[in-house]
Amino acid sequence: MATAVETLSNLERRITVKVPVEPLQQEMSSRFQRLTRTAKVPGFRPGKAPLKMIEQQYGPQVKEEVFAEAIETSFGQAIEENKLRVVGMPNIQHKPLNQVKEDFEYTATFEVFPEVTLGDFKAISIDKPEAQITDKDVNKTIDVLLKQRSQFIESKEASAKGDRLTLTLTSFINDKQVETTGDKPIQIILGDDSRFAIFDDHLVGEKAGESKTFEVNYPETHNPKELAGKTVQYNVNFIVVAKPKLPEVNSQFAQSLGVLDGNVDQMRDEIKQSLEQELDKRVKIKLKEQVFTQLLEVCNADLPKALINLEINRMAQSTYANLKQRGADLKQFKLDPSMFEEQAKKTCKLRLVLAEIVVKNNLRASADQIKAMVNEFALNFDDTEEAVQWFYAEPSRLEEPTALATEVNVVEWFITQCKVQNKKTTFDELMTGPAPA
């Protein structure tokens, strides 16, 4: 087998491979011999058909299979001999295989993984958030838990934020009805962050049995977009106003949170421990965000088109899956690949940079680190032991915990290479960021 490699660009290569036909003809003869034992030929019992008839009937199929396998095998040998790391599927060109009668050549055009240039990490400075869990944080969490367990008592008083309202509602845009609850009342908690605040403001100060008509002007940026920039008139009938009655912070409340003996001090300690765990996750997320941002800025690598296209396809498929899960009609959506391109480039670059750092510094997660990450994942399941077994039952299921554990190693290594400044903050400020994975 003879090969020649051409460099078409920084990442694109074309390799020409010459394949000898004689070994392939020998392989075809062997396959024909095996087929004589099992092939079904009209007029003959299995295994009794003459070899020439087998060759006539199965010749084109066998030749196609043998020659295609030879191309695949020789390509693998060629890239290994030339130490080429191929990205994506190669574009292989050759004359029609049914016309080949002697030694033949094919060309394979493909991209290779780029060289990654790492930046000067010592010149980089990142902020490490520094916060303490205070009694105020614990009390705030207890307040949230109390509200979640509150009972609502019907009241003749006017409505206020935090009350539960039972009401019927009809809305109009340009005097055209667009929504109604009909005769079936709905319940809302007044002041819920999931609604437009001005809408709830209009519901404050009303009593059961009263009605109110008001207008809300929604901004152009409002979501859902159906209401963006619109003026909506609401007719609301207040059926029940119920005031929240919070439970007392006592042994019964502590038991409802899993403290078996009802010790309130122990409950507060456990809440504090839980907040400290959340705080630790948030700090790690903030560090990871900064490290990854810096890696994208100071490291360089040419990006193979094949990698970018694969990532664009992955992102598009994920978006379609999310839309389907939400009940959307996928026929109404046509996602333009360009909308994913910028993020796909960042993702591909970061993967290449991370892979380079991991290999150069031997940072791949150990078996113990992977197991710890799997155990952390398993906490989200009712049966943690069964969840762990599920992860280890299929090697591909370990890819995500392995990647995340390896990323932890990269972040910890990076912190030793750059300047780190402690930055005082609070738990509330850290909680404004994205939720930890």
Image: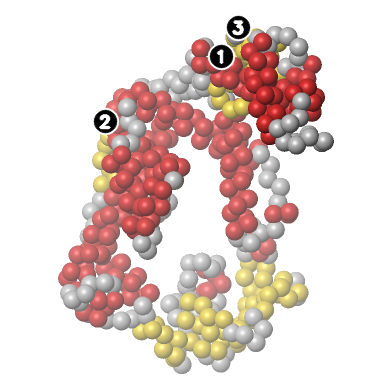
Mark with earlier residue (1, 3): 3
Instruction: Give the structural element (helix, strand or loop) at label 3.
Output: strand
Instruction: Look at 37% across and 28% down and name the residue there.
Output: 358
Q: Which residue is mark 3?
A: 2
Q: Find residue 363 and report its horizontal and vertical position in percent.
A: 32, 31
Vertical side of 247 occupied by 267: above or below: above
Amino acid of disc 3: Ala
Q: Amino acid at mark 1?
A: Ala
Disc nearer the start of the sequence (2/3): 3
Q: CA distance from mark 2 to mark 3?
A: 49 Å
Residue at 75%, 37% (x, y): give it.
Answer: 45
- Say if 56 sits above or below 436 in the image: above
Residue type at mark 2 is Thr
Q: Which residue is mark 2?
A: 416
Query: Which color mode does the image show?
Result: secondary structure
Q: Confirm or deny contact between disc 1 and disc 3 (CB under 8 A).
A: no
Q: Which mark is residue 78?
A: 1
The secondary structure type at the circle numbered 2 is: helix
Q: What separation in Å lies between label 2 and label 1 (alpha carbons)?
A: 41 Å
